[in-house]
Image (cartoon, rainbow, N blue to C red):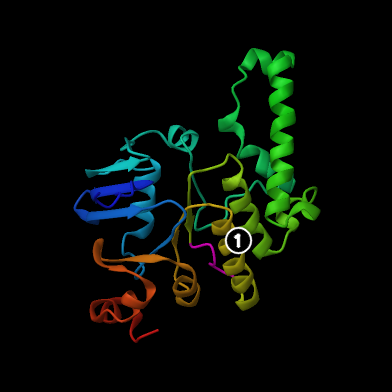
Amino acid sequence: MGETVKEAVLHCENITQRFSGLVAVSDVSMDVYTNEIVGVIGPNGAGKTTLFNDITGIYKPTEGKVFFGGEDITGMACHKITAKGMTRTFQNIRLFNNMMAIDNVLVGLHTATKAGIAESMLHLGRHRREEKESLARAEEVLQLTDLYEYRYHYADSLPYGLQRRLEIARALACHPKLILLDEPAAGMNEQETTDLLQFIRKLKSMGNTIILIEHDMRLVMNLCDRIYVLDHGTRIAEGTPDEVRKNPQVITAYLGEEV
């Protein structure tokens, strides 16, 4: 019998993104498999966040296709992609600062609710049941992410590292099949970065599949199963951390020396 071929959770096929005369992403293909941590690295302006935006529906690729769970989701609206099980965080933290931690997580559950406007306004049975289930899930996620003791703290009162974690907790709320993290260690000190590394490893041990953009090479090399390297919108390398750190083209374009 032949070897079983694993189907990718995410398959990006020849993605190109143009903005007028600028080519931000050029013919990039990428696969992500279940329970992997995949890194996307490269210099500033390499096209990393643009690629994330193409994947998550913020942009529609000029050319190419995005498949999620085998389904073509190219150009699909963001909220529809989220409802299918893909969530993300952003380079700049996007929390509701005037809301408590638990309410921020509850916001992440809105795509999972089915009750209509009338049911919600009249507080009918399905709405009450979903409200109770959402609260239980929010508390569960806060416990999993070691944020439960802060559940009634306002988001802007939390230390920076915990705000980052809260944003990831919100992304986890609706049982995603794939989580995209855009520079999760940005602005963190050494201890916060170490805590984040351990936290993302914990997410993987729970069965989560993760893609992350990150400039902290210590975190990337110690965390990722595979890494894609972009430069000027083009994929220049792909492989294990050991393969990437020794790749002459990557060293020249980005790392500067073996790391």
Left or right position of 252 against 142: left
Q: Is residue 249 above or below residue 119?
A: below
Q: Residue at x 38, y 73 (%)?
A: 241
Q: Per the image, is 129 magenta?
A: no
Q: How many marks?
A: 1
Q: Per the image, is 187 magenta?
A: yes
Q: Residue at x 72, y 23 (%)?
A: 129
Left or right position of 74 against 185: left
Which one is nearer the viewer's eye here, 210 or 47? 210
Give the image location of residue 15, x and y in percent. Answer: 24, 49
Give the image location of residue 165, x and y in percent. Answer: 63, 58
Q: Which residue is mark 1?
A: 202
Label 1: element kind: helix
Give the image location of residue 256, x and y in percent. Answer: 33, 84
The span picked out in magenta is 183-188
Task: Give the quarter of the image for residue 227.
Answer: bottom left
